[in-house]
Image (cartoon, coloured by chain):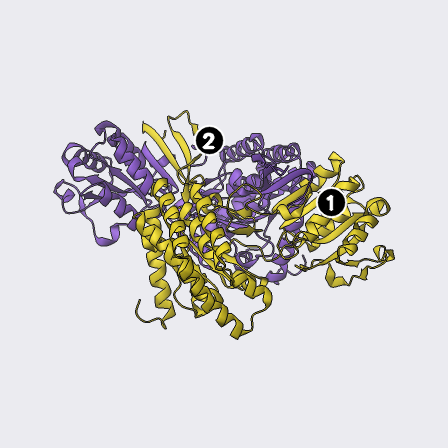
Chain colours: A yellow, B purple
């Protein structure tokens, strides 16, 4: 790759190499992938000083660019955070290898034995913003699932990502795997992103990791399939049959544990018969915890609430703010979620089994929670190990996307000379 | 729908209705769907005279248009073929309902019980050519899997499809299901197809059923995901370890049983060490059966072969023709398949387990056959009941697509007030 200004040529070459590496990764024994990931973890830890130094360059660039405090914090790598990256790599190394797993098998009277076997998807493109740790997480998850990956980190994390990527490549080398299995786009030029999104000949799926701006752009421009969620407009519905203590605990955790993650509650729906018994207490507790409650007319009677406007329904605050309204009945709550939700995670607090089943049946979000905090919407909490992201689409992947959902399958049909009549 | 010339408006209205119907179908009890399908089967049989009459109009139109004999035959409905449609509907009615099935479930130490539950995809668009029976098959499979469907039949089968569609709707009505669950595009205008392919707000997946022209058009123009195969460039590789009798039987069946289906063999690859022992006999038997064998230099020594040209590799004949060549070893066969194949169905004839496993690992076709005729590439033969088509993509669906692969899933997470630490 000589001429870094000819972006289409640079990206086509990356795509071609990724596809060649993917063909080889598809039948790499699990132990070799584990070895590569362990060696990468060792390398990251051994070279932590180098990584911190590269990160310092990014931090200086970010300061000059006037990044917000939150963005600067996401960009920052400390020895502690690097330890987190190392542990993440080792955890993925230790995970079960999904490739080659027989998902189903059956016999046919014609003499066929049919197996449905997991295969890698092929080439995954990951586009992310300023978190340099995504380089390690996404690279490792794609390798585990037998996919080649093309990483395109944010320009702010350019040097940090490159330093981490070097360690991943040294792991691949040590295990004798193709170095092109994990490639990092070597330019900050944004044209590389547009190019990546159109490379249907080389890329099987794109995973964007970042804010609404990035994800929206990817979803609009991509010709390659995308695993992503645009927003997490998370609703919690308190049914008439809800338990007051559980309702209080779950709502408080769902809203206040961390407000900036996609599983944080953004809207509270309260059954009219639960307003006095549960709703008022919950709303007061939220206000006491410093949450701004944007309430409908009925709930505005509670001191300290703010008046909700029409555009508070269906809004993702990612902040210490929640919308709240009273609904006539469960169906009105479901209707509200269907109208304003984003198919990410929605929750019912209820004890009545019929109310629970109605909600489960009729709310088609990737994750439907019953009497559980929506902040559990996470691959780690689901027991999947790492996740490459959360998907709200209905095709192929949904909810937290771990190694298994980065695979496809093929049918292997064995017989002893069987012919069709 | 008043103004049938405003195609975008007509199609948007159809999409809107389909989406509304899909929301309701998602939680329709299995028995109601079965009832609708049984009632539809009854209606098709009761109205068979009407259907034959409608078909006569299509046949007259087809004759005027100068359709080929093969196309006219595909278009034709006889009482016998209508009986086939009725049996197909009853078979789908009797199939297991995939919706709501728990695919996996597990507990987490945090108190969560997580279930992965099958859900419908939503709205399926089916675009097909002159086979009127697709109206019944595709409509029924989509209903079984809880999806609303928008059917767009070929203009040649316009009246036949409408008559069959009327029966499906009467089945829906009888079972109290929304009539918009199965809609037929009420115009022959081709603009309706372009519109359908772009309706990402309303349509979740498109299934094209027809020739390369139709499928290619759909794959190029669709903004909605597509389940399809463009071509079935099916290879059979005869390994050095192949059994001569099985090789002969399987190749003959794979090529000659029916030449016009996508699972028919199109290219024969013979290991150099198997040429004299097996290959020659197989090639001679093909020629004797009237197959035109387009051979490479070595095989041209066999009397009656024709000289293959460069464009015979990777070609789908759908006719009594086969390409044939000698390969140096198994890897050369695999390389040939990777270069010229279409990821549909490919087969190895071998007795050596190592050779078989190498082929299984390295050939990433939707269906990999071992010592079995490639003509088994069919949902019915796989035991899936009906299929809506065969897919060669890696995303979501692959191989024969039955009711199960027309579904997605969601996570249902139950707890007793669990909060995240």
Q: Which mark is residue B383?
A: 2
Q: Position of residue B239 (x, y in %)?
A: 22, 36
Q: Residues within 10 Å of mark 1 (few under 14, many from 20)?
A: some
Nearer to us in this view, A334 or B92 = A334
Which residue is more in the foreground, A341 or B87?
A341
* Viewer can see residue A103: yes
Disc sitting over residue A249 in the figure: 1
Residue drawn 32% across and 54% down?
A179
Q: Secondary structure at mark 2?
A: loop
| Residue B304 position within the rendered picture, expressed as x and y whole percent measured from the top left | 16, 41
Q: Is residue B323 visible?
A: no
Report the Cα–Cα distance between label 2 and label 1.
49 Å
- In the rendering, at what x and y percent does residue B63 appear? 45, 50
Q: Quadrant of the C terminus of chain B?
A: top right
Q: Which mark is residue B252?
A: none
Say few, some or many: other residues with alpha carbon within 10 Å of mark 2 (under 14 / 14 to 19 / 20 or more).
Answer: some
């Amino acid at each position: 790759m000589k001429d870094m200004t000819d972006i289409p040529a640079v990206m086509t070459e990356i795509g071609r190499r990724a596809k060649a590496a993917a063909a080889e990764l598809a039948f790499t024994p699990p132990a070799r992938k584990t070895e590569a990931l362990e060696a990468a973890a060792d390398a990251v830890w051994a070279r932590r000083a180098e990584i911190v130094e590269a990160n310092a360059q990014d931090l200086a660039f970010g300061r000059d660019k006037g990044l917000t405090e939150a963005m600067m914090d996401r960009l920052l790598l400390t020895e502690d955070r690097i330890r987190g990256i190392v542990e993440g790599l080792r955890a993925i190394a230790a995970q079960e290898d999904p490739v080659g797993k027989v998902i189903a098998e059956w016999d046919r009277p014609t003499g066929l034995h049919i197996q449905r076997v997991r295969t890698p998807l092929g080439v995954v493109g990951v586009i992310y913003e300023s978190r340099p740790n995504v380089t390690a997480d996404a690279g490792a998850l794609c390798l585990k699932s037998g996919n080649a990956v093309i990483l395109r980190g944010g320009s702010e994390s350019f040097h940090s990502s490159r330093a981490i990527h070097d360690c991943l490549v040294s792991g691949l080398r040590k295990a004798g795997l193709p170095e092109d299995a994990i490639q990092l786009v070597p330019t900050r030029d944004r044209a590389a992103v547009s190019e990546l999104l159109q490379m249907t000949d080389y890329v099987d799926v794109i995973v964007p990791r970042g804010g609404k701006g990035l994800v929206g752009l990817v979803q609009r421009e991509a010709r390659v399939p995308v695993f992503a969620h645009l927003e997490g407009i998370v609703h919690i519905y308190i049914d008439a049959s809800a338990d007051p203590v559980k309702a209080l605990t779950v709502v408080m955790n769902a809203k206040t544990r961390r407000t900036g993650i996609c599983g944080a509650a953004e809207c509270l729906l309260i059954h009219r018969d639960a307003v006095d018994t549960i709703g008022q207490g919950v709303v007061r507790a939220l206000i006491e915890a410093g949450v701004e409650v944007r309430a409908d007319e009925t709930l505005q009677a509670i001191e300290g609430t703010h008046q909700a406007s029409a555009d508070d329904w269906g809004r993702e605050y990612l902040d210490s703010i929640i919308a709240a309204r009273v609904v006539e009945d469960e169906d009105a709550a479901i209707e509200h979620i269907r109208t304003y939700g984003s198919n990410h995670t929605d929750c019912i607090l209820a004890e009545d089994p019929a109310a629970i089943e109605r909600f489960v049946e009729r709310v088609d979000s990737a994750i439907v929670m019953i009497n559980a905090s929506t902040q559990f919407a996470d691959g780690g909490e689901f027991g999947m190990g790492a996740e490459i992201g959360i998907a709200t689409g209905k095709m192929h992947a949904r909810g937290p996307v771990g190694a298994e959902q980065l695979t496809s399958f093929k049918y292997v049909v064995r017989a002893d000379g069987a012919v069709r009549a």
